[in-house]
Image (cartoon, rainbow, N blue to C red):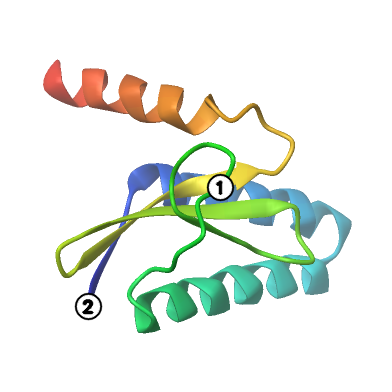
Amino acid sequence: MKAIFSRQFRDDLAREEGRYHEISERLAGAFHERVAGQTREIIRWGGGDHVGPHGLPCRRSKPFPFYISYQVQGDTIYFLGLVHERRHPDFLKELMATARKRKSGD
């Protein structure tokens, strides 16, 4: 199974890790390891069967309040972004549409 991490996913991870780092270096490390562990699980199982509130497959990164959103196409998993559990369900869809418009405008 091939994994592709979107720019949005990497930016989200860096931003949230930075926020946790302001509180504690250990907390930032724990957040990073939790997300890394969850992405490894998603890759190992070829996705999953859970669909989040935004209509895309996801996995919750407990105890942190984020969903790891992804899409499976063939033998490739695309990691789309980290979405806070309290975000409106259309948030990620709007972000993806904006990114597609920017990309097609290049």
Which is nearer the eye, 3 or 47?
A: 47
62 sits left or right of 67 in the view: right
Sequence-wise first label, 1 or 2 = 2
The type of residue carrying mark 2 is Met
Classify 48 as above or below 17: below
Q: Is residue 80 visible?
A: yes
Q: Is residue 106 visible?
A: no
Q: In x, y percent, where is residue 52?
A: 56, 47
Quadrant holding the N terminus? bottom left
Residue 52's disc number: 1
Q: In x, y percent, where is residue 81?
A: 47, 47
The type of residue carrying mark 1 is Gly
58 sits left or right of 87 in the view: left
Check disc 2 and report its element: helix, strand or loop: loop
Q: In x, y percent, where is residue 24?
A: 85, 64
Residue linked to disc 2 = 1
Q: Residues within 10 Å of mark 2 (few under 14, many from 20)?
A: few
9 sits left or right of 83 in the view: left
Classify 60 as above or below 6: below
Residue 22's disc number: none
When asked about the image quadrant of residue 31, the answer is bottom right
Which mark's residue is nearer the viewer, 1 or 2? Answer: 1
29 sits left or right of 11 in the view: right
- Residue at left offset 79%, top offset 66%: 63
When asked about the image quadrant of residue 35, the answer is bottom right
